[in-house]
Image (spheres, grey):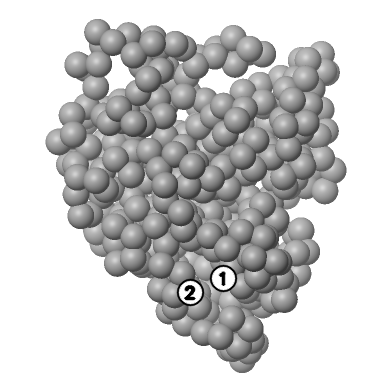
């Protein structure tokens, strides 16, 4: 795939990517319920943006001077959704791209529209302040040149709006964590949340951007869950085809955040080896499982039940966060795994159930990679169906004829090796 096309799909053109993706997803799920739109904010005074609603402060990036549809006065609070409307929901999502596009769903799927940008302090809970301030200053240069390279391995580019868009993306994740936690206080089976955001985040390291990623969205959300909601133990599952090195590095020495990554062996960025298990107090709280090329649905089902489930059960999380990369799909051009739309339905369904079993149903997905718009949109839509408990429509898209025999012996060896290292 030409570099220019990859760049459009990723960091510096999120509106074109996410807008197209959400249009396709919308077509896949249009049969859900009657048309009805909600702007969901939190209803509990302890939440991060309730005080902002009372103050009427807008969400404004000083570089772009734009807001994210979230200026309210105290008098407007009676228009916000009720606790009942939140309890009716089975899925909550937020979009951080293609702002201004209306998405219509039934009352069991709510779109968070009125959320605030992540603050510099939120970002600095994971990233160096020098990096954050340096990126903001670089927006002036991006305004002059139109496009600047901010990291070469991916590569990662930026336009004049990248800093602002990255704060929006991180803020969407924080708002979804807030909403899921709020719902879990009032119901046994709270809605699952999905942050459909660009730029993605799992490659961004504490000191800078990397691999199309600017800020570590899932890592920032993990710290937010701990700091704001007192959810001490956070379990992060990353099933992107590439290793989430940024999330890995952010929590290497933290015993209270378990990071589990499955990824294709030898793929970008070359990290995520079996023996990367954390350091110091965090030793054992990082699990990396590189899978051989050609691994598919059978491999991932086995990984889920033999690795992910026992790890989560032993860790006893308070919330589960998911770096959901859809670039392991057999049609994706950047790797050579054989996941199908059905694989992602299985993962979404099983992870939702795992969260229900272990942590009161608190679970938030974050969109990471995915470079074939067809397989991406179908797979995301099928993930939503899994959250809703509806049948998969993967058979309408997946073509078994293009699949080939999985390297079962090598997969088994990889699973046995990681089970031995982590005493599973």
Which of the pair 21/360 is nearer the observer?
360
Measure the alpha-carbon separation of dots 1 and 2: 24 Å
252, above or below 135, in the image: below
Q: Secondary structure at mark 2?
A: helix
423, above or below 385, in the image: below
Expressed as whole percent of the image width and height from the top left, the position of residue 203 reads: 69, 50
Farthest residue to the left: give it.
84
Q: Name which residue lies at 67% across and 60% down.
A: 252
Q: Name which residue lies at 42% across and 34% down.
A: 175
Q: Name which residue lies at 40% across and 73% down.
A: 313
In the picture, the disc for residue 187 is: none
- Mark 1 or mark 2: which comes first in sequence? 2
Q: Which residue is mark 1?
A: 338
| Left or right of residue 244, residue 110 in this image | left
Question: How would you rate the neighbour count of disc 1 (Cα within 10 Å): few for under 14, some for 14-19, many for 20 or more?
Answer: many
| Left or right of residue 232, residue 265 in this image | right
Q: Which residue is mark 2?
A: 311
Q: Name which residue lies at 22% across and 27% down.
A: 81
Expressed as whole percent of the image width and height from the top left, the position of residue 293 reads: 67, 74
Marks 1 and 2: which is nearer the front? 2
Residue 23 lies in what quarter of the image?
top left
Question: How would you rate the neighbour count of disc 2 (Cα within 10 Å): few for under 14, some for 14-19, many for 20 or more?
Answer: many
Which of the pair 157/87 is nearer the observer?
87
Quick check: can you spot residue 142? Answer: no
Expressed as whole percent of the image width and height from the top left, the position of residue 399 reads: 46, 68
Q: Secondary structure at mark 1?
A: loop
Quick check: can you spot residue 277? Answer: yes
């Amino acid at each position: 795939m030409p570099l220019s096309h990859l760049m459009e799909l990723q960091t510096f053109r999120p509106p074109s990517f996410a807008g197209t993706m959400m249009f396709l997803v919308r077509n896949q799920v249009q049969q859900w319920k009657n048309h009805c739109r909600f702007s969901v904010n939190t209803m509990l005074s302890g939440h991060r943006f309730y005080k902002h609603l009372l103050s009427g402060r807008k969400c404004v990036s000083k570089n772009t001077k734009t807001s994210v549809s979230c200026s309210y006065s105290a008098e407007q609070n009676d228009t916000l959704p009720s606790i009942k409307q939140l309890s009716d929901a089975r899925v909550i999502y937020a979009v951080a791209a293609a702002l201004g596009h209306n998405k219509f769903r039934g009352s069991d799927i709510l779109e968070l529209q009125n959320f605030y940008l992540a603050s510099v302090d939120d970002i600095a809970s994971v990233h160096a302040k020098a990096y954050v301030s340096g990126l903001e200053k670089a927006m002036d240069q991006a305004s002059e040149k139109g496009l600047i390279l901010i990291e070469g391995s991916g590569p990662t580019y930026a336009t004049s709006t990248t800093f602002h868009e990255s704060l929006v993306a991180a803020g969407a994740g924080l708002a979804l964590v807030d909403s899921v936690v709020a719902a879990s206080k009032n119901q046994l089976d709270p809605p699952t949340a999905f942050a459909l955001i660009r730029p993605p985040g799992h490659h961004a390291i504490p000191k800078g951007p990397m691999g199309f990623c600017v800020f570590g969205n899932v890592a920032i959300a993990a710290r937010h869950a701990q700091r704001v909601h007192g959810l001490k133990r956070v379990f992060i599952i990353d099933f992107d085809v590439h290793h989430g090195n940024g999330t890995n590095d952010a929590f290497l020495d933290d015993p209270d955040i378990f990071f589990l990554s499955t990824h294709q062996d030898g793929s970008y960025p070359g990290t995520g080896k079996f023996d990367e298990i954390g350091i110091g107090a965090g030793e054992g709280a990082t699990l990396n499982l590189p899978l051989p090329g050609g691994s598919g649905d059978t491999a991932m089902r086995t990984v889920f039940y033999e690795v992910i489930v026992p790890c989560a059960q032993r860790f006893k999380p308070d919330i589960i966060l998911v770096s959901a990369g859809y670039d392991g799909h057999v049609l994706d051009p950047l790797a050579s795994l054989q996941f199908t739309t059905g694989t992602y339905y299985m993962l979404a369904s099983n992870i939702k159930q795992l969260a229900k079993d272990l942590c009161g149903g608190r679970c938030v997905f974050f969109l990471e990679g995915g470079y074939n718009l067809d397989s991406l949109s179908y797979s995301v839509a099928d993930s939503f169906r899994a959250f809703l408990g509806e049948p998969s429509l993967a058979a309408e898209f997946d073509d078994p004829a293009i699949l080939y025999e999985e390297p079962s012996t090598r997969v088994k060896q990889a699973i046995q090796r990681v089970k031995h290292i982590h005493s599973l």
